[in-house]
Amino acid sequence: MSAEENMRIVRRIYEQVFDRHNLEVVDELYAANFVYHSPGNPDFDREGLKGAFATYLAAFPDVRMTIEDMFAAGDRVAVRFTCYGTHQGQFMGVPPSGKQVTMTAILIHRLANGKMVEDWEWSDQLGVLRQLGLVSLPQ
């Protein structure tokens, strides 16, 4: 598939999952052998990804996402995005706080035959914990 086609697939996933809360698209657009990588977290598969999405959407049901940058080369699509939401459900063991949270992330997606096969993500998890008041840094 072309880089443009791969970017359309990635954009569709972001719109379906984050804008429409449609997790059925995961089975459609992620390969059965999909693997997700993120520093400090264990790798997980397609089912683990659906669980992570469901947890995030339950914790931040009003989540909005803005794609800041997206570009592709070959079978890879890189995306830098920002998510905004209100902490209304349990997240990482933390009960709802009602606080507004902003999270930035960068993902590199690898696609094959029109499906996601591998993701590498870096997200500002420390920033989220700081916004929730769970972590403070020395002055």
Image (spheres, rainbow, N blue to C red):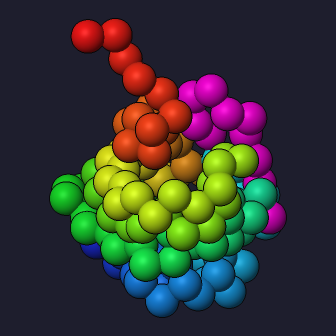
Residue sitting farthest toward the left: 68
| Quadrant that contains the N terminus | bottom left
Residue 137 visible at all:
yes
Majority SS type along the magenta span:
loop
How many numbered marks does the figure carry? Answer: 0
The residue segment tinted magenta is: 37-47
Q: Residue 59 is drawn in which quadrant?
A: bottom right
As rendered, which of 99 and 78 lies closer to the eye? 99
Place of residue 29 in the rendered image (x, y in percent of width and height, measured from the top left): 60, 77
Q: Is residue 38 magenta?
A: yes
Place of residue 19 in the rendered image (x, y in percent of width and height, measured from the top left): 41, 83
As rendered, which of 77 and 23 lies closer to the eye? 23
Q: Is residue 20 left or right of residue 49?
A: left
Residue 116 visible at all:
no
Q: At 45% across and 45% down in the image, what residue appears?
A: 132
Q: Is residue 4 magenta?
A: no
Q: Is residue 116 above or below residue 110?
A: below
Q: Is residue 116 left or right of residue 18?
A: right
Q: Residue 130 is drawn in which quadrant?
A: top left
Place of residue 2 in the rendered image (x, y in percent of width and height, measured from the top left): 35, 69
Q: At 51% across and 77% down in the image, what residue appears?
A: 61
Q: Is residue 6 left or right of residue 80?
A: right
Q: At 73% across and 39% down in the image, what residue appears?
A: 43
Q: Is residue 17 left or right of residue 128?
A: right
